[in-house]
Image (cartoon, grey):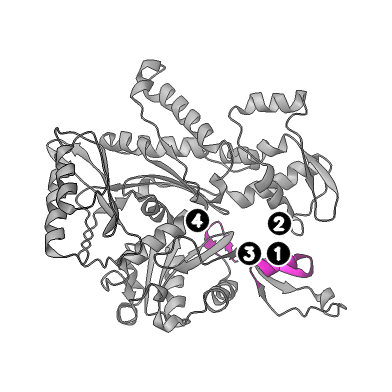
Amino acid sequence: MDSRNVVVCDNGTGYVKCGFAGENFPTSVFPCVVGRPMLRYEESLMEQELKDTIVGAACSELRHQLDISYPVNNGIVQNWDDMGHVWDHAFFSELKIDPTECKILLTDPPLNPSKNREKMVETMFEKYNFAGVFIQIQAVLTLYAQGLLTGLVIDSGDGVTHVVNYLTTGFTFFLGRFSEPILTLILDLFQLIASAGDFLHVPWNGSIASWAFGVKSVFPHYGKYHASIEWPGILTKISCNFFDIGHKTIIPIVLNHNDFSISPQVPVVDGYSFPHLTKRMNVAGRHITSYLVDLLSRRGYAMNKNADFETVREIKEKLCYISYDYKREYQLGLETTILVKNYTLPDGRVIKVGTERFQAPEALFTPELIDVEGDGMADMVFRCIQEMDIDNRMMLYQHIVLSGGSTMYPGLPSRLEKEISDRYLDVVLKGNKDGLKKLRLRIEDPPRRKHMVYLGGAVLAGIMKDAPEFWINREDYLEEGLACLSKCGHA
């Protein structure tokens, strides 16, 4: 199947990212908003004629003339009629596809109500007549985009923040259309990796025979953690993470490809998340923007929570950051003017923003600031790992992956690392600082993490586009109804 016939659509609370399987960037990113003209503007003497409903970026430009609504709130679709307008805009105006000839991969936050997924599947088949549908948890797609099958994902977007750990045990192997000698070599190589050495990186050197000899020469001993093999032309990268449980070696393997068509025929995946350990916090980008409106009003700048919301969001994205030490930073803000920055509003006025720059995003770590009960981001991560089986905790500490637009604040990875280390020292080590040397804490903050969920969806859809058993097809839906969601593991 052509990649243009497999659509990937990540419906976020703030933005919709949509495109096609195998792409490195979303084809279209637009705000998930729907606007309708206000009554007082109907007889306005304007040259531009307003439509009955306006979706996406046009709403931002005309927001002072529109009554704006957000169909998705906290990751859950609240208004299905408006969501239909958003999908119409995505499929027909942005991607320009015929849904009847396409399959679609949709995303869903963890711990969302099952009714949300059921209605999504129903809409895709009943209204748009897609040939196949699949719904995947957002955190899992983030790991796929990062080339991992095991790790802990912190996904913080516009409406919801969640922490999910995802573990792969067993052998994961996507078998493509290769010639027999190459297949034999790949299988031999994987047996070799099972008794691997410390670190492997063998570049391609012209011939399969000499390259294979180079691989064998770097495997003198046993007991290893990560291997990366570059093989241009056939595979861009084989990345393996493996670990030991007793005498059994467990090897998850991911095959990533560039422009080569690798059509998987034997996907055997044994990875799973832990719903009972998934943590969710309804504090994310939109709540921080709203809190910043309150902070600016205390400073004397009267901002309207509806009309000026987009303006304040731009202030947040340009000026806000996470403080490494909140108390010290606050003291610095009170005693000096070093933190004060100027911002020019759309009407030309210049405002000064000081301690608000780090006070607003502090709500991610201290939700009580905006009257939300529960743990902050660092506490959620620590609890999520500590409630896991003791055998797997260290592996999760080594693979903490950030995802979503609200993790883009400068200073967030270092603050997260500091707070997790402090909690580990207090709770696990009981103040023994020597034990911190054994904590191999690693927070991965890929620069493209704003669109990580979409990228993971594009990778998964590209690999699975020719695997009919992967998709919920129209026949499954007509025969089983909403019970067909068991194919996605959500029924």
Q: Amino acid at mark 2?
A: Glu
- Quote the CA–CA distance across marks 4 and 3: 20 Å
Do tag 1 and tag 2 residues touch (Cβ < 8 Å)? yes
* Residue linked to disc 2: 310
Please tell me whether mark 4 or mark 3 is closer to you in this view: 4
Which numbered disc flags the more N-terminal residue, 4 or 3? 3
Q: Amino acid at mark 3?
A: Tyr
Which numbered disc flags the more N-terminal residue, 1 or 4? 1
Q: Quadrant of residue 332?
A: top right
* Residue linked to disc 3: 70
Which numbered disc flags the more N-terminal residue, 1 or 3? 1
* Residue linked to disc 1: 60
* Residue linked to disc 4: 451
What is the span of residues highlighted in magenta in the rendered image?
55-77
Q: Residues within 10 Å of mark 3 (few under 14, many from 20)?
A: some
- Quote the CA–CA distance across marks 1 and 4: 21 Å
Q: Amino acid at mark 1?
A: Ser
Which numbered disc flags the more N-terminal residue, 1 or 2? 1
Residue sitting nearer the eye, 385 or 47: 47
Q: Residues within 10 Å of mark 4 (few under 14, many from 20)?
A: many
* Residue at (55% x, 37% y) in the render: 412
Which numbered disc flags the more N-terminal residue, 2 or 3? 3
